[in-house]
Image (cartoon, rainbow, N blue to C red):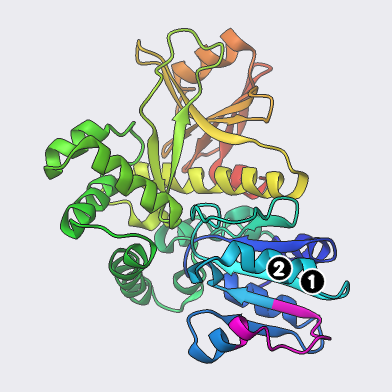
């Protein structure tokens, strides 16, 4: 199935290097090889493969290679300087594509910067917006049940999706973390990860997690930063600009695989919407160079709205509340919308009829709203 970022990646390759980044098993290697089909004689090199490493270190590819694909190159010492050298000395008609399952800006390496030499594109799990025009268009239940990662989503059987998820989580915590950094207390890190699965939708206190696990808040924050760097989770922080008495600190934590959320259908639905909104913002930013972000609203009096889409000028574009059942507009959504003149949307999983509530407020079916992002 063609991925939504393919055309833009192909265009950007004509100008600079392109980094495709995102969670493990989200389809980065598959996409890179699909793009390679447009080139006669493209070369795929994975740093995890011993023979490929020799080619990489020796730069022993043909000078007329039209496309070089480097996979997991961030595992190479000095990879930034290496890519800079390759890019600066390559023939004009050679294109370079780089993929990795870690944030390529998370490694702080000495040496020259790659600034100005690459575009970044984020490949995210499937969302209903990306599934438009396919046989799965509007299939909210399937994506809720299986998550948006290609293998479990496209598979024939739900039990296979469950087996994939168990293996996926174990691999991330056992192998990827240790490849990325040293962790002394692996058990504590696993406990933090498991606790986060039960706290989706609420601001996460590092101090509270630290008490539960028996480590310091600094250690908890380090673990979360590792999970973020490895595309396991992402943080959504409170929006405070011009919002009176807003809370300032604690973020909410969401999983790229919303099916990891445990024992709470409402939190799982909220996480799915978070992934869709986050993917929408990343696609727009990768395409235009803008710097939007996803936030949430919460005041010290307890007024809270799940999400706020913030543009590069730090202005609110719209605010979004999620609900699993039909019902009246959330009072907090109405309050923020009217007080600050912001469009508000209540996204409902089980909704009989979409409707407007005044000039700024809408109640939308989840499948319709998410497909339009």
Numbered mark located on residue 85 in the image: 2
The residue lying furthest to the right in this view is 92
Residue displayed at 50% across by 44% down: 273
Q: Is residue 67 magenta?
A: yes
Residue occupying image coordinates x 42% and y 64%: 146
Residue occupying the point 55% across, 35% down: 294
Q: Position of residue 137 (x, y in %)?
A: 62, 60
Quarter of the image containing the C terminus?
Answer: top right
- Where disc 1 sits, the SS reads helix
Report the magenta residues as a range: 55-68
Marks 1 and 2 in Cβ contact (< 8 Å): yes
- Asked where in the image residue 40 lies, by quadrant, the reply is bottom right
Q: Is residue 57 above or below residue 360?
A: below
Q: Label 2: state its secondary structure.
A: helix
Residue 4: where, in percent of width, then height? 69, 61
State whether residue 56 appears in this view: yes
Q: Which mark is residue 181?
A: none
In-front residue for pair 315/213 = 213
- In the picture of the structure, the residue carrying the numbered disc 1 is 89
In the image, what residue occupies the spot 37% across and 52% down? 226
């Amino acid at each position: 199935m063609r991925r939504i970022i393919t055309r833009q990646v192909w265009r950007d390759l004509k100008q600079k290097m392109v980094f495709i980044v995102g969670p493990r098993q989200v389809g980065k290697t598959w996409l890179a090889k699909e793009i390679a089909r447009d080139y006669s004689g493209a070369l795929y090199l994975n740093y995890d493969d011993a023979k490929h490493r020799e080619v990489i270190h020796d730069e022993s590819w043909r000078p007329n290679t039209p496309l070089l694909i480097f996979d997991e190159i961030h595992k190479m010492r000095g990879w930034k300087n290496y890519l800079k050298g390759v890019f600066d000395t390559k023939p004009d008609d050679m294109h370079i594509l780089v993929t990795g399952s870690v944030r390529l800006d998370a490694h702080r390496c000495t040496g020259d910067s790659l600034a100005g030499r690459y575009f970044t594109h984020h490949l995210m799990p499937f969302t209903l917006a990306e599934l438009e025009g396919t046989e799965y268009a509007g299939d909210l239940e399937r994506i809720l049940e299986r998550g948006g990662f290609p293998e479990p989503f496209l598979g024939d059987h739900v039990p296979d999706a469950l087996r994939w998820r168990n293996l996926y989580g174990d691999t991330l915590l056992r192998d990827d973390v240790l490849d990325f950094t040293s962790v002394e207390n692996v058990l504590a890190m696993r406990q933090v990860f498991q606790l986060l699965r039960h706290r989706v939708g609420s601001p996460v206190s590092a101090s509270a997690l630290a008490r539960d696990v028996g480590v310091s808040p600094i250690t908890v924050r380090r673990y979360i930063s590792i999970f973020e760097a490895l595309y396991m989770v992402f943080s959504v922080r409170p929006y405070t600009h011009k919002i009176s008495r807003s809370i300032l600190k604690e973020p909410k934590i969401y999983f790229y695989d919303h099916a990891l959320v445990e024992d709470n259908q409402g939190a799982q639905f909220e996480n799915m919407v978070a992934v869709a909104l986050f993917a929408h913002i990343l696609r727009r930013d990768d395409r235009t160079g803008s710097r939007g972000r996803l936030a949430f609203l919460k005041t010290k009096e307890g007024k809270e709205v799940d999400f706020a889409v913030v543009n590069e000028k730090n202005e609110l574009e719209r605010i979004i509340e999620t609900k699993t059942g039909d019902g009246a507009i959330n009072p907090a959504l109405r309050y923020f919308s009217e007080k600050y003149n912001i469009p508000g949307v209540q996204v409902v999983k089980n909704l009989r009829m979409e409707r407007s509530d005044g000039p700024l407020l809408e109640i939308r079916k989840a499948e319709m709203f998410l497909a339009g992002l």
